[in-house]
Amino acid sequence: MRSALLFAVILALSLARSFGAVCEESQEH
């Protein structure tokens, strides 16, 4: 159970980072 929660947190962080990078890129162009 704890490992699944940890995996979900890591997945959310990676998604947030990639989403933020896309937002910054679209703002620059």
Image (cartoon, rainbow, N blue to C red):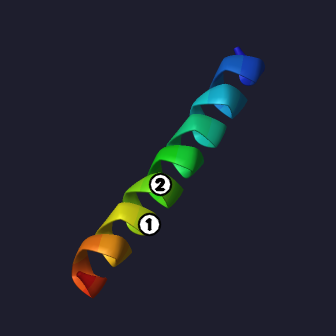
Residue at x-position 76% and y-position 20% = 3
Across and down, in percent, residue 25 comes to: 34, 73
| Secondary structure beneath label 2 | helix
* Vertical placement of residue 20 versus 10, above or below: below
* Vertical placement of residue 23 versus 29, above or below: above
Amino acid type, residue under disc 2 in the picture: Ser
Whether pointer 1 and pointer 2 mark residues with C-beta atoms closer than 8 Å, the reply is: yes
Residue at x-position 74% and y-position 22% = 2
Across and down, in percent, residue 6 comes to: 71, 32
Residue at x-position 30% and y-position 69% = 23
State the CA–CA distance, disc 1 to disc 2. 5 Å
The numbered mark at residue 6 is: none
Amino acid type, residue under disc 1 in the picture: Ala
Q: Residue furthest top?
A: 1
Which residue lies under the disc numbered 1?
21
Residue at x-position 38% and y-position 56% = 19
Which residue lies under the disc numbered 2?
18
